[in-house]
Amino acid sequence: MDAVIGFFQFIQGLGVSVVMPIIITIIGVAFGTGIGKALRAGLTVGVGFIGLNLVINSLLGTSLSPAVQAMVERFGLSLSTIDVGWPASAAIAMGSTVGLIIIPLGLVVNIVMLLTNTTQTVDVDIWDYWHFAFTGALVAILTKSLPLGIIAAVVNMVIVMVLGDVTAPKVEESLQLPGVSLPHGFTTAYAPIAMVINKGIDMVPGINKININMDTVQKRFGVFGEPILIGTVMGLVIGILAGYNVTKVLTLGVSLGAVLVLIPKMAALLMEGLIPISDAASEFIEKRFKNRGKIYIGLDSAVGVGHPVTLAISFILVPMLIFIAVVLPGNTVLPFADLAVIPWMFVLITPIVKENGFRGIIVGIVVLVLGLWIATDLAPYITEAAKNVGFKMPKGASMISSICDGANPLTWLLFKVNSFGYIGSAIGAVVALAMAIWNRGRIKKEAKRLHGENSAELS
């Protein structure tokens, strides 16, 4: 077991840009694309991820977060719980006992679900299995039971895989990512909330007619409605609120304008590599498995961050989040390190609201408020988990939390249900199993429809 764990830790340490080309190449060869075509696809995907990471880390991470922190300091805002950010959360999760086994365990869960036809997704995003480990680590601390923590991690993954399948058609249509699903433990958790709120808005006369999307904005404002200028203007506003000098304001404006331009281009490059693999997978399934629907490649939701509506909503809500955190009753978390990951919350919200910026902002305010309360509630357990793995606490901090995954509603629900011990664990397992069985029925219906259409076309 130590050798197995060591191997997967080595794989994880290689990083997404190295391992993804290897995985995509292997999958491509398995689906019959040929070694040359598969290798080219794999390397293209790797280059795409390098580009995404460069833009996100160099432009978004190092520009937006410091600006908002400067705004916090300028207005003298302070709260008692420190947001340590997703890298710290991931380190805490992967350093736990659940984290040591989550990658091989997650691969087994995915394979079992594929074999039982309860998922359509081949989830190659093994690095983001840490989200499931995070849930498991917190549950293990709460219940003082490692088995319950492992069960919670598996339940989390099964639920996210089903949600990834269900939202995949919207990902294809709205985000222009054919053959891709996003079974991401953080992003996908907000999809059910968005669905409920979107349905509720549909029932409100007048409000249900409001529709703000990028096409409308661009038609009305011409060149000033294009993503590059929207990002630049928002950057200028945030820079002014941060009290920056003219040079830094202008630099931030250009940087955020660049984000809205470059992320979609990097995502397009990544998709150039994935499309041949996705097509080969669909053809393979079509020939050999008549009871299966379309097969999706499960990726990190970073590939969908670059949608103009997602980024526009995020740039509006990031400074607003600071205000909400200060005035929200019961909140103790000061958002800081995870401000740059706010767009990840909206990757699936954008297609669910059909790219309507107005609805996206409404959903965004709700999930941010809920997220702050959740992050506050989980802070004592996140702090204990951090101490268990030897995480160095920030100077002067007695309590830590994060937006990703400390504000995750699915993690919180599984945490709360497991407060009932084995009964709660059983409830979570039954819910996950019921969702998997329901998904199997949905997949079989989709397969029947697809194969029927294909037969009609052939005749």
Image: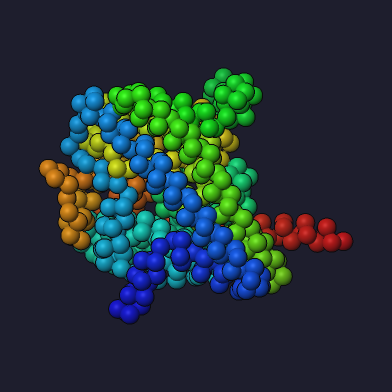
- Residue at 45% over, 71% down: 108
Q: Position of residue 59 (x, y in %)?
A: 41, 41
Q: List the single residue furthest toward the right.
A: 459
**Quadrant that contains the C terminus:** bottom right
Q: Position of residue 234 (x, y in %)?
A: 44, 27
- Residue at 30% over, 68% down: 100
Q: Which of the pair 418/185 is nearer the observer?
A: 185
Q: Is residue 198 left or right of residue 13?
A: right
**Quadrant that contains the N terminus:** bottom left
Q: Is residue 193 left or right of residue 140?
A: right
Label count reads 0
- Residue at 53% over, 39% down: 261
Q: Which of the pair 82/57 is nearer the observer?
A: 57
Q: Is residue 328 left or right of residue 429?
A: left
Query: In the displayed structure, would residue 421 be above or below residue 82?
Result: below
Q: Is residue 186 left or right of residue 327?
A: right
Q: Position of residue 92 (x, y in %)?
A: 26, 57
Say which quarter of the image contains residue 209: top right
Query: In the displayed structure, would residue 43 be above or below residue 373?
Result: below
Residue 266 appearing in the image = yes
Query: In the displayed structure, would residue 335 be above or below residue 238?
Result: below
